[in-house]
Image: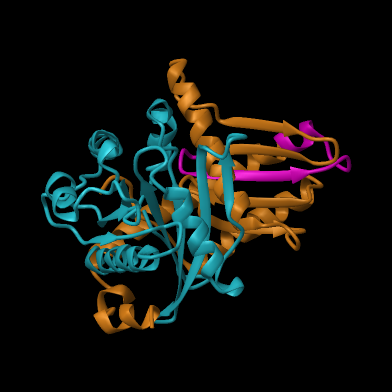
Amino acid sequence: MANPQLVMYEEESKQVNAIIDKLNKEANAKVVFVVDKNGQLISSSGETEGLDATSLASLTAGNIAATGGLAKLLGEKEFSIQFHEGERDNIHITIVGGRVILVVIFDQRSSLGLVRLRVKKASDELAKIFEALAIKAETEAASGESPFAEITDDDIDNLFS
Amino acid sequence: MSFINYSSREINCKIVFYGPGLCGKTTNLQHVYGKTNPDAKGKMISLATETERTLFFDFLPLSLGEIRGFKTRFHLYTVPGQVFYDASRKLILKGVDGVVFVADSQVERMEANIESLDNLSINLKEQGFDLDKVPFVIQYNKRDLPNAAPVDELKKLLNPNGVPDFEACAATGEGVFETLKAISKLVLIELKKSH
């Protein structure tokens, strides 16, 4: 397989949520998202009502992919930080541990400096979790205990009935 | 690659619609969007030029229902079909779980179909995938046009391996859901196999 499959378990999900809740508070941000590089939303924290999180995740991943393409053209490994400034809201995007994307949306209640500082700490913590998660997912996959092994053709057909 | 979230009990998969320029990839997604229950879909996003040619991608998230207590979500993407957008096409194939190749049935587009199919194979390989192994279906679109080539000929040229293929007219929606259903099934079967 080209990429290891991303799996999220209850325990790690709680750890990730705790980190981004803390980041959201300490950075005075509006919303914090964790997105995987393929555009799937992993977790979110803050004022998420009224925000189209699925689209945001997909566009962020597209953005990171396009910027990664630019980096390669210039002989860079990647551009790990992106910042978009708007009239009201700003978006700060970082790649965490080469695996996932951390998105922080903030307004004038915070500042770029504060966000960068807090993001750095949170990134390190998140990187450790996702690294451990990748190893755990591999071990679990190797052990062969998965609810999907028992999916029947009927289960799949029922989705379309 | 699919994303399995045990915490929220969700499976997320990525399906990419590939094919030459103006073959009807975006039209396929628009039809799915138009005919799907509002509860089962998110917003459709199109990153297109002013003349409605896809510039980067179209994106449509769909929920298919539950399987063994897990919500299944499919993210449908299209690539820009025009030859010179190759760098963007490569990016969209990252982490793909299944591919639909939309062929333009018109006789004069046959070369464009072959070129795009070759391009798909090369770009998948760059991402570490093999077109013969990845869940893959073909759709022969624009069957309603008078200059459409016979299906037998299309099969011979584009589908030598005999993957599931469908005749369609995306503008009226004919064959669109059949194609989607087939690729979704293949993706779920692959998920079952890999576990």
Q: Colour of chain A?
A: orange
Position of B150 with respect to A53 (left or right) is left
Which residue sits at x=58%, y=34%?
A: B49
Residue B4 location (% of width, % of height): 42, 64
Residues B18 and A27: in front is B18
Q: Is residue A96 visible?
A: no
Residues A110 and B37: in front is B37
Q: Is residue A107 visible?
A: yes
Residue B16 location (% of width, % of height): 39, 50
Which residue sits at x=30%, y=66%?
A: B182
Please tell me whether residue A28 is drawn above or below residue A77 in the rendered image.
Answer: below
Residue B169 location (% of width, % of height): 38, 58
The single residue placed furthest to the front in the displayed view is B146
Q: Is residue B7 magenta?
A: no
Which residue sits at x=43%, y=64%?
A: B173
Residues A115 and B77: in front is B77
Please tell me whether residue A32 is drawn above or below residue A147 in the rendered image.
Answer: above
Q: Colour of chain B?
A: cyan
Residues B103 and A146: in front is B103
The single residue placed furthest to the top in the displayed view is A74
- Residue A104 position by quadrant: top right
Task: Provide the residue span drawn in magenta.
Answer: A96-116
- Residue A15 position by quadrant: bottom right
Position of A96 with respect to B76 (left or right) is right
Quadrant of the snapshot with the C terminus of chain B: bottom left
